[in-house]
Image: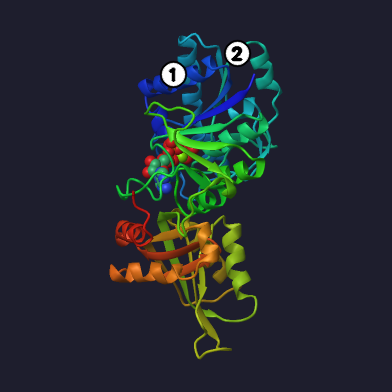
Amino acid sequence: MPVLVMKFGGTSVADLARIKNAAQKVKREVERGYDVIVIVSAMSGKTNELVGWVEGTSPLYDAREYDAVVSSGENVTAGLMALTLQEMDIPARSWQGWQVPINTTSAHASARFVSIPRENIDAKFAEGFKVAVVAGFQGVSAEGRITTLGRGGSDTTAVAFAAAFGAERCDIYTDVDGVYTTDPRITNKARKLDKIAFEEMLELASLGAKVLQTRSVELAMRYKVRLRVLSSFEDTDENSGTLVCDEDEIMESKVVSGVAYSRDEAKLTLLRVADRPGIAAAIFGPLAEAGVNVDMIVQNISEGGEGGAFTDMTFSCPTNQVIRAKAAMDEAKAAGSITFDDMVVDSDVAKISVVGIGMRSHAGVAATMFKALASENVNIKVIATSEIKISVLIDRKYMELAVQALHDAFGLEKA
Ligand code: ADP
Ligand code: ASP
Ligand code: MG
């Protein structure tokens, strides 16, 4: 039997009625002749609640216990989905990560797949079961502890199963009907894309477009999984949604294809760092060890110019890692490996990015971007560029305005 992977996100399984609605979509695919692997998220809001409980109990929590708690939301929806399908006379069985087993690394809260053996699920299909419902987001480490894959990780579970089972397609059902030029909740001028290139989707996702977890796009690209994003609330067919595919499958090409934002950014500056060879390693080594995901970095020119004794070092990271970053820097200072006068934290910044493979061959994108922000009086705090993206850090209160201005400036709106 051909295999199809269908993933339902939090809003798509938010209550019993929605689980039933999702199950109906699964039933349709079973009737078309597929063996279906259904990946479910926790009910919407559940994972946030669980994370809140962990942080409320222990601010610098042990990540093993974080995973034990936050993975539990998916267990509930997996069981409920299997029961709902059984009520519809579809033979279905649920699986938690450890039961498959979904083997991952031991990097708690951001684990990666090691292997997904097919035997157990294949055996159930061979017995006549039509649907395997798998709890997304979770796995098990070599030590036998429960792990999670990072927020939004059920998307990655779905793509990994599609790769492991050679699925015909991996359909990601969510609360929007596809991938848009920007978050449709920020501007109603956002346009749905019929297709988007893997590279662009990868950048958009890593720059904040949470419609797909970054890692899921990486895996789909590597294993050539046909990945589609579509609505769980609308009637859908083979042509619905957005297909994430190779660049050469796309006819229409624009210099910029999307605008992404990330709200939860913080900017940290170490003031008057003693400037000497090895100083960057002495700062960013401990940050990495503390699990801080440093994004942008700016080192100011030293006081007194080239060869001066002191400099300021600025970097950005997610707001929820500021406590860890501060602790790591204070510890390094106390141990004498770095010196600085003060650490200034600005937790009210957002990152806005424009993405497009057309940038490779077009000059002037940065100028257009900066002009559009200037005309809205938005001050840029930090800039970073790569081959197909330009990102800026700005005050968070201008985030929506900046996204809208850039969406207009690059002519992304609906025709
Ligand atoms: P799920 O719970 O189904 O995994 P998510 O909330 O993780 O859903 O992702 C879907 C959300 O992603 C949408 O509701 C939308 O607000 C947001 N989003 C951000 N950027 C985009 C984009 N470019 N296109 C579509 N949706 C986007
Ligand atoms: N429930 C997890 C989260 O909210 C995983 C997911 O939904 O993809 O991050
Ligand atoms: Mg998601």
Q: Nearer the viewer, residue 62 or 388?
A: 388
* Inter-mark Cα distance, 2 to 1: 17 Å
Image colouring: rainbow
Q: Residue 336, located in which quarter of the rendered image?
A: bottom right
Q: Residue 265, located in which quarter of the rendered image?
A: bottom left
Q: Which residue is mark 1?
A: 24
Q: Nearer the viewer, residue 9 or 101?
A: 9
Q: Nearer the viewer, residue 300 or 254?
A: 254
Picture coordinates of residue 178 (x, y %)? 43, 39
Q: Number of numbered discs present? A: 2
In the rendered structure, the answer to whether residue 93 lies left or right of residue 187 reads: right
> Residue 129, labelled with which disc?
2
Picture coordinates of residue 220 (x, y %)? 60, 41
Q: For ligand 1, tell me if the residue under mark 1 lies within 8 Å.
A: no
Q: Which of the two discs, 2 and 1, sits closer to the camera?
A: 1
Asked whether residue 377 is in view, the answer is no
Type of the residue with mark 2? Phe
**Above or below, 44 relative to 63:** above
Q: Nearer the viewer, residue 237 or 35?
A: 237
Q: Are marks 2 and 1 in contact (CB under 8 Å)?
A: no
**Identity of the residue drawn at 48% across and 18% down:** 28
- Mark 1 lies on a secondary structure that is helix
Tell me the crowding category of disc 2: few under 14, some 14 to 19, or many 20 or more residues within 10 angstroms, Cα based: some
**Above or below, 51 relative to 332:** above
Q: Residue 259, located in which quarter of the rendered image?
A: bottom left
Type of the residue with mark 1? Gln
Tell me the crowding category of disc 1: few under 14, some 14 to 19, or many 20 or more residues within 10 angstroms, Cα based: some
Picture coordinates of residue 121 (x, y %)? 65, 21
- Mark 2 lies on a secondary structure that is loop
N-terminal of the pair, mark 2 or mark 1, is: 1
